[in-house]
Each structure stands twice: as C-alpha cells, then as structure tokens.
Image (cartoon, grey):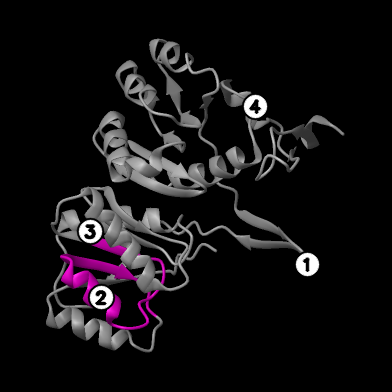
Amino acid sequence: MNNKNKKIKLRYGENPNQNSYLHSNTKTSVLKYKINGKKMSYNNLIDLDSGLKCLKEFREPTSIILKHTNPCGIASAKNIEVAFNKSYESDPISAFGGIILLNRRVSYSLAKKIFKNFYEMIVASDYDQDALKILEKKKNLILLKMPNIKKMPIEYKSTLFGDLYQTTDLTPINKNFLKLVSKKRGSVKSIDDLIFSLKVVKHLKSNAIVLSRNKQTLGLGHGQTNRVDALKEAIKNMNKYFRKGIFVCASDGFFPFTDSIKLLYKNGCNVVVQPSGSINDKKVIAFSIKNKISLYFSKNRLFKH
C-alpha cells in the first residue's frame, strides 16, 4: 500500500471495545498537523471533520465548541478571544470534554482561558509559542495546527447497500440567500444574525433550530424527531444561560404548522428564517404579518441527516 492509501491505526472506534483505522486517501495525513497529545481516535476524526466543515462557513474570527459532531456553542466577534468567550458561554456544561475549533491564532491569554477547563482537542490556524507552552502541559490534550483545507465538491457515506454520493452544497449563505415573505423587514443587525444562524444550522443534525443574538448561539435544538421538540430544546437551553430579550431563529426545514412560529413569538423572537414547502406556508406568513414578525424564506433547505 503506497503513502497515498496509507492505513493508520487509531486509538479505538466509537467505543473502546471497537478497533478502528483511518484509510487515508490524501497525500498528507491529518496526523502531520498534530503537535501535541494522545493518539487520535475514530470519534476525534469524526468530530474534527464535522467541526472543520462548519468553521469553513466563517471568515471573521469565529470559535466553535463541538461535542459528538454537533456544535454546542458558536460565536463570531471582533477578535478570537471574545469569540471563544461567547462560544463557551453559550453552553458551558456541554463544552466539557468537547473540541474547540478556532480560525485564528491562539494567543497566550486565550491559552490560559482554555487551560482552565477540560477539552479533548484544540484546532487552530496557529499558536503563539508561549501559548503552546501552557497547552502542552496537558499531555493528553490533542493540539492540531490546521491549514486552510478546501471543501471537497463530492460527499459520500458508506451504507449496507454501497457508497452514497452527493455534491456538496456550496451555495453562499448571504443576503441573497434570504427572501422576505412578511411585510416587516428585519434590521441590518438582525439580518447579520440570520446569516450567522443559517451557517450554524446547516451543520446541525436535523431537525435543527438555531437561536442567536449578536452572532452568538443562545440555544440549539437538533437531532429531534419533530421540529417543535427541537425548538423547545433550543428555547430551554437559551433560558438556562441567557436573560430574556429579542433574538432571531433559523430552521433547517419548514414549520409544518403555526405552533412553532407562535412559540417563537411568545418567547420574544422577531426575525425568523425557514425554507418554504409546507402546505401551511400561507398560514405561517399570515401569522407573521399579523404579529409584525420578519419572516424570511431561505433559498435552499439545509438538512443534515
């Protein structure tokens, strides 16, 4: 087997009793970017893959704290230290034992904050030398210095029936991704938060809901079998860590009934984005107009199964 198809043994699989290995089909192994820590596991690589795909959506300083392939806190800010603080505050309990992904250099002061808690892995574009000296004190902490990895145009998954392939959704998520369908237009700030929320919801397991304010996730709902429960989960998490106030909501699928939009309105949400396609779209629009909610339809659906 040549270097292009190298078989790399991993620490273990999804559970410690399962063996696993990485069949690397690239010229450079991911292990080349590892600069500290224990041997990587199957779960570490799955989380790394999910986290990097999400991080690539953002250009401004952004911090993602991820657990079991799903983000538990994401924030963008004027600098990476502020972004990290806000991502941690989004859900400090879930952050324990997660992985941190940063699209900027880790400074000494940021390293000191990270050092205070337990994480499995830190991924950053670079590290200051004095920051490394702090983080390397945790011998098991996996540190990765990652370059600008490009998105692959084709995605695939292995199933019992063979490999499934699909093109990667590379549609830019920006103002052109939104279409106002109610009468009230959202503020510039709320539109920025909607775009931020859509970039996050794209990388959560369906059904997925993102509640945010000031480019910080307040509450996330994902992996539920119905959209109302996903929304309730997000609201519950928001109320646990944040004071009441206005916020925006992004949904990866349409609201099939008006119950979700009513629940959002009751809790102070004034700007919402969802894809169209429900037989009750007109009822959701009518409720939004009546209650002066800024309702937008997204250009594409953003399911992740």
Pinpoint residue 68: horizontal percent, then vertical percent.
Answer: 52, 47
Residue 15 vertical position relative to residue 234 in the rendered view, above or below: above
- Disc 3: CA contacts within 10 A as few (<14), some (14-19) or many (>=20): many
Between 73 and 11, the residue placed more toward the observer is 11
Earlier along the polypeptide chain: callout 1 or callout 3?
Answer: 1
Residue type, mark 1 in image:
Phe
Pinpoint residue 165: horizontal percent, then vertical percent.
Answer: 68, 61
- SS for dot 3: helix
The disc placed on residue 161 is 1
Pinpoint residue 249: horizontal percent, then vertical percent.
Answer: 27, 63
Give the Cα distance between marks 3 and 4.
Answer: 42 Å
Residue at 28% across, 59% down: 236
Q: Is 136 within the magenta? A: no
* Residue 292 figure quarter: bottom left
The disc placed on residue 39 is 4
Residue type, mark 3 in image:
Ile
Q: Magenta stretch? A: 248-276
Q: Decide if residue 17 is on the left or right side of residue 205.
A: right
| Pointers 2 and 3 in contact (C-beta within 8 Å) | no
Q: What residue is pinned by disc 2?
A: 261
Residue 78 vertical position relative to residue 70 in the rendered view, above or below: above
- SS for dot 2: helix
Furthest toward the right, the residue is: 1
Q: Decide if residue 9 is on the left or right side of residue 234.
A: right
